[in-house]
Image (spheres, rainbow, N blue to C red):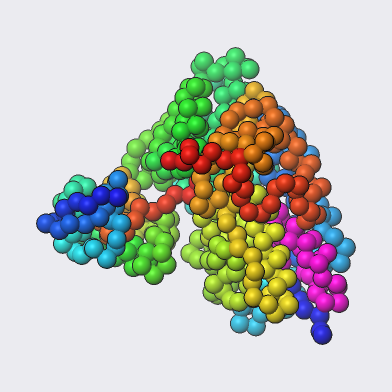
Amino acid sequence: MTATVIAKRRVDVDAEGFLTDPMQWDEELAEQIARDVGIPELTERHWLVVRFMRDRYLQTGNAPSIRSLGKESGVPIKELYQLFPKGPAKLAARIGGIPKPKGCI
Amino acid sequence: MSTQRLVILGAGTGGTLLANRLRRRFDPDELQIDVVDRDDLHVYQPGLLFVPFGLAKPAGLARSRQAQLRRGIEYHEAEIDHVSLADQRVHLDDGWSLPYDALVVATGARLLPEETEGMTGPGWLESMFTFYDLPGAAALRDALAKFDGGRLVVDIADFPIKCPVAPIEFAFLADWHLRRRGIRERTTVTLVTPLDGCFTKPVASKHLTHLLQERDIGVEVDFAAGEVDGAGGRLISYDGREISFDLLVAVPLHGGQAYVERSDGLGDSLGFISTDPATLKTKAGDNVFALGDATDLRASKAGSVAHFGGEILSENLAAFLRGRSLPARFDGHANCFVETGNHKALLIDFNDRIEPLPGRFPTAVGPLPLLRESRLNHLGKLGLQWVYWNVLLPGRGIPFVGPTMPLAGKRLAAAA
């Protein structure tokens, strides 16, 4: 774990850039992380997914998998990939300030 | 005291061994045990991997479900329509219903090839197969026998899946099979996974990646297949990338059973049961428990997890039925033999906290080496089938192998 500066704030992140303390997160931070990972602007659809991931993590301690995300968020998986290229669950988790979703072995 | 009623849904690995353990523990006038399953075919699933290569015969892998249950257990062969948590009753599709004081959901996972666009369309069971069920494994055997080289692709649609190492084992065995037939040189073997590595536990991943490289098996990571074009032989990812194949071995999406979706409050959106990883009690109620592949646990969906979890759950159910608090805690213990071809296998043993590490199993002096290829591990894998029918399912313990993962014998310093 290392401390870094995002959007002029000191935050703790893991080796892959995921926040280790979800409480250090806010929307300004989310917008900066999104730009860092190649999403210039967060649209309403992006926010819907990011908030869904974050709320679910804070409620249950687990971030949903891409399939549950597709079934429960109301955003189809294909669109999730258009919104968050290269890995919707991972990117939305990173932007939402929660730990990287764990794959099962 | 009146007789209590336990209903166990599913007569696979977990349901069967749990029913047998509890039948030995309680007199019939203390506890009635009802077990429900849709058919009378209990398949030894670890054997499915060998069928496509002619190394196991389909008929040798299946037995009667009912015959694995002790006397004094009521077996109902019926589809489950739904569970009514409110009136504590399981409704069967033949019109019967079973009231329960305690319920165990152990109906496993269901293969959902139709949930990937195009998968069950043109080419299904012609150039696209799965070995995850008995008819699929047998059909793949026939196709592989006719296969004369080209692009062989093993694709994992998404997790969770049963036995997460099986696709890797399939690639190892395919490599061996093709070499023996002299057509390996004109065949590419590629393993396609939605994860960012062939295996998510760092130390084991390093070992397995090395073994894959040695055998010239390609690995395509971060590829989430959203669509299959069977006629054109193309696997297409959600983000538009393509992989061509001549023969596709698909590990389809998995979900819980359909009745879970019809039962208010029982499962999650994928049909799995939200379960406490330590006690195996579910979120559906204090008298509802779940075991094995049917759960939403992070632990692997594998027979060994159902087995170790079953030992823990039989302790907890016995306590629950006697009105005591739940004493036993599951650690997610799992182990499996990973076939690597040429009569060798490696063994991994791990839990929720400790990743698979090198060393020896089940004790510090072995006899089995961990995370290293050996003939002994291969013989262990073959011997497991006898142990399964004769020791595991009857609900007896395996000597030296307890439900909690042993630390003795593991080189903890090797952890990542």
Q: Nearer the viewer, residue B370 or B10?
A: B370
Q: Quadrant of residue B234?
A: top left
Q: Is residue B278 magenta?
A: no
Residue drawn at x 70%, y 66% as measured from the top left = B315
The residue that appears at 51% across and 42% down in the rendered structure is B412
Q: In which quadrant of the rendered image does the C terminus of chain B lie?
A: top left
The part of the image, by quadrant, that contains residue A31 is: bottom left
On screen, B218 above or below B31? above
Q: Count the marks: how many?
A: 0
Per the rendered image, the range of residues in magenta is B7-34
Give whichever of B272, B40 is nearer the camera. B272
Vertical position of residue B116 compared to residue B26: above or below? above
- Residue at the outermost right position: B71
Question: Which residue is at the far left?
Answer: A8
Residue B301 position within the rendered picture, expressed as x and y whole percent measured from the top left: 58, 51
Q: Quadrant of residue B108?
A: bottom right
x and y percent of residue A66 in the render?
40, 54
Q: Position of residue B93 (x, y in %)?
A: 70, 69
Q: Nearer the viewer, residue B294 or A72?
A: B294
Query: Residue visible at 79% across and 70% down?
Result: B33
Left of B29 or right of it: where is B114?
left
Q: Mark yes or no: residue B49 visible.
A: no
Q: Residue at x 29, y 46 (%)?
A: A16
Left or right, residue B92 beside residue B224: right
Asked whether the viewer can see residue B27, the reply is yes
Q: Position of residue A23 (x, y in %)?
A: 27, 66
Q: Is residue B11 magenta?
A: yes
> Is the N terminus of chain B in the top left, top right, bottom left or bottom right quadrant?
bottom right
Name the foreground residue: B126 vs B374.
B374
